[in-house]
């Protein structure tokens, strides 16, 4: 983690981070350990000794995750206006879940697991700004339709779009009407079975590849590419962390 990244994270994890229990002596090193797990996909027990006892790093990750620190950071970046957000995109991707991810208390549906053609899977629903940077994310079972995932990510705390890009999987009267009622323009290709096809601006729609590239970048974090986490909040926490790193990477490349 660079000094610039730490300057941002410090404002949240030191002041507003989980305050229950014994606080880590070095928040920055703990965060580096969490990022190491996210990047390598290694089990918590294999965390390098440099980052301290794995139990301490894991407990602190859970505290920050359950108190909503990662979402608060992402919300702050999304509302900063640093990247244009009048044009936004939504999409989803299916991630295979490792068999060791099963077994959490409660039904698998509550933990974002499902059965689809790909087997035991989780679906990541993502909403990005015009730059292809995440502003909201949620997970469901792999068999859940894009329609249901759409409602979740669009209800998240983030600036409202003026134009929304999505693929055919989001072609429904409900989605189109809700966007138009909010004063937004839906650019969504029509399904083949739609009686009255809707014409779209192909030039603007071509920008949707940015959210596809965003998914590819997120999958570079191996903890996301394959789901090992038993609980939905832990896996979603890693998605938020990987999203935050993409924001910082954007700032570095734009300066």
Image (cartoon, helix red, strand yellow):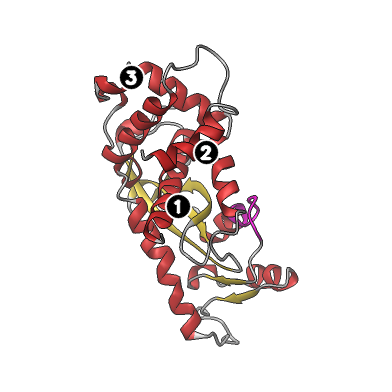
Dot 1: what SS?
A: helix
Residue 4 placed where, x, y %? 43, 42
Q: Quadrant of residue 45?
A: top left
Query: In this orientation, does residue 145 appear?
Result: no
Distance (Cα) linking label 2 and label 3: 20 Å
Going from the N terminus, do you reach mark 2 or mark 3 first? 3
Going from the N terminus, do you reach mark 2 or mark 1 first? 2
Is residue 231 part of the magenta span, yes or no? no
| Residue 233 in the image: above or below residue 24 | below
**Residue picked out by circle 2:** 70
Residue 174 placed where, x, y %? 66, 68
**Residue picked out by circle 3:** 54
Stretch of the chain drawn in magenta: 151-159
Distance (Cα) linking label 2 and label 1: 13 Å
Residue displayed at 42% across by 67% down: 210
Dot 2: what SS?
A: helix
**Residue picked out by circle 1:** 247
């Amino acid at each position: 983690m660079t000094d610039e990244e730490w300057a941002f994270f410090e404002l949240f994890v030191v002041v507003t981070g989980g305050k229950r229990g014994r606080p880590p002596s070095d928040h920055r090193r703990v965060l580096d350990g969490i990022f190491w797990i996210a990047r390598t996909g290694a089990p918590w027990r294999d965390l390098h000794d440099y980052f301290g006892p794995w139990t301490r790093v894991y407990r602190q990750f859970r505290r920050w995750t359950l108190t909503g620190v990662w979402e608060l950071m992402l919300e702050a970046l999304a509302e900063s206006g640093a990247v244009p957000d009048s044009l936004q995109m939504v999409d989803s991707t299916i991630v295979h879940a490792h068999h060791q991810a099963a077994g959490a208390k409660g039904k698998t549906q509550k933990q974002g697991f499902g059965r689809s053609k790909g087997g035991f899977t989780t679906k990541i629903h993502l909403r990005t700004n015009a730059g292809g940077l995440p502003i909201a994310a949620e997970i469901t079972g792999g068999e859940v339709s894009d329609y249901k995932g759409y409602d979740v990510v669009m209800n998240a705390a983030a600036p409202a779009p003026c134009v929304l890009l999505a693929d055919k999987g989001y072609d429904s009267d409900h989605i189109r009407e809700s966007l138009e009622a909010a004063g937004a323009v839906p650019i969504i290709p029509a399904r083949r079975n739609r009686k009255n096809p809707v014409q779209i601006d192909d030039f603007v729609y071509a920008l949707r590849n940015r959210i596809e590239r965003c998914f590819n970048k997120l999958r570079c974090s191996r903890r996301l590419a394959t789901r090992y986490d038993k609980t939905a909040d832990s896996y979603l926490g890693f998605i938020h962390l990987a999203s935050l790193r993409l924001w910082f990477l954007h700032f570095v490349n734009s300066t």
